[in-house]
Image (cartoon, helix red, strand yellow):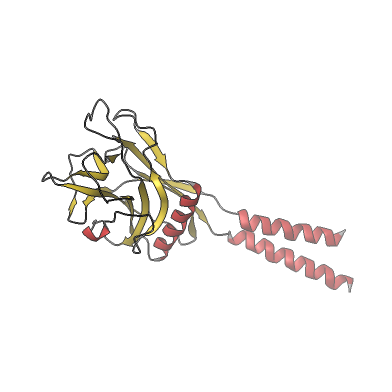
Amino acid sequence: MKNRLGLLVLVLSIFVALTDHTASAVQLQRLTDSGIASADLVVRNPYSTLADVGFENDWTGKLEPWAAVCVFKLPAKSSDQKVSSASFTVSMTRTASDGYQPYGVTPTFNGDLYALSPRSTPQVLTSDYYGGAYGGDSTALGVQDNFLTPTVVTRNFIYPSIVSTGLTADATLVQYLNDAYDNGSGQYVFLRLSPDSVTNMVDTSGYFGLFEKQPSAAILTITFVPEPGFGGWLLVLFGVGLMRWRRAKLV
């Protein structure tokens, strides 16, 4: 009976050690947002309401494929915390003709989600651009293939479509963010949306429009959880000691 009691204490101690934490969630609004046209230039238009992914005119009227990069500043965390869950959400519109954009057409491609290497500054670089098949950019981490698709229900500026990462992509984001924190808090992280095809594009290839302005701008949600608590591990040691003491008494 006493041996069973010791075993019960040990099991409960391990359970407490592994669950002795409180999760905390943080929603990060996009810090800045840049559209990159074929790596020729970085554009940040403070008067724009959308960041485009696909085939669009640049400011000179030239038709080019565009990618969009969302920049987030990581919040400070305590040394015993790790990222336990994460997700990325955008509000999308204007993939087809609507009352606000009569010239819009349905895209003939998908939009893929990538994570770029964290940096100490929030500037988006021309070298951040990529357009092409998923996984074809060796400098970026693939997060989700076909994150944006033409089949997503598209409304207008008042009722945008909300698109969020899936479970596999969420797990990839968790690893990416923990790696970023391991390199030091205060890092900026970059999530890029790229067209998965840039060949044979014409002005009817279309594009995805992502809201840049609050409250509909892109959101990165991060949940932190501490490592197993010190008090819980003390209980584990107590349980192990109790088991050994009972064995010694029985010998």
Left or right relative to 111: residue 9? right
Location of the N terminus by quadrant is bottom right
The quarter of the image holding the C terminus is: bottom right
Residue for point 63% across, 63% down: 233
Residue found 27% across the figure and 35% down from its top:
105
Number of disc labels: 0
Residue 133 in percent (x, y) is at: 35, 55
**165 on left or right of 68:** right
Closer to the camera in the image, 244 or 67: 67
| Extreme-top residue of the structure | 99
Q: Is residue 8 left or right of residue 205?
A: right
Image x and y of residue 58, in percent? 16, 46
Residue projecting furthest to the front: 200
Q: Position of residue 120 (x, y in %)?
A: 29, 62
Q: Quadrant of residue 246?
A: bottom right
Location of residue 175 with respect to 87 vertically, above or below: below
Q: Nearer the viewer, residue 145 or 198?
A: 198
Which of the 4 image quadrants contains residue 159?
A: top left
Using the rendered image of the protein, determine whether residue 186 is visible from the camera's viewpoint.
no
Residue 136 image offset from top left, x and y in percent: 35, 60
Instruction: Let me know if residue 198 appears in the view.
Output: yes
Q: Is 218 or 197 nearer to us in this picture?
A: 197
Residue at screen point 24% across, 45% down: 55
Of all residues shown, which one is farthest toward the left? 60
Height in image: 95 above or below 186?
above
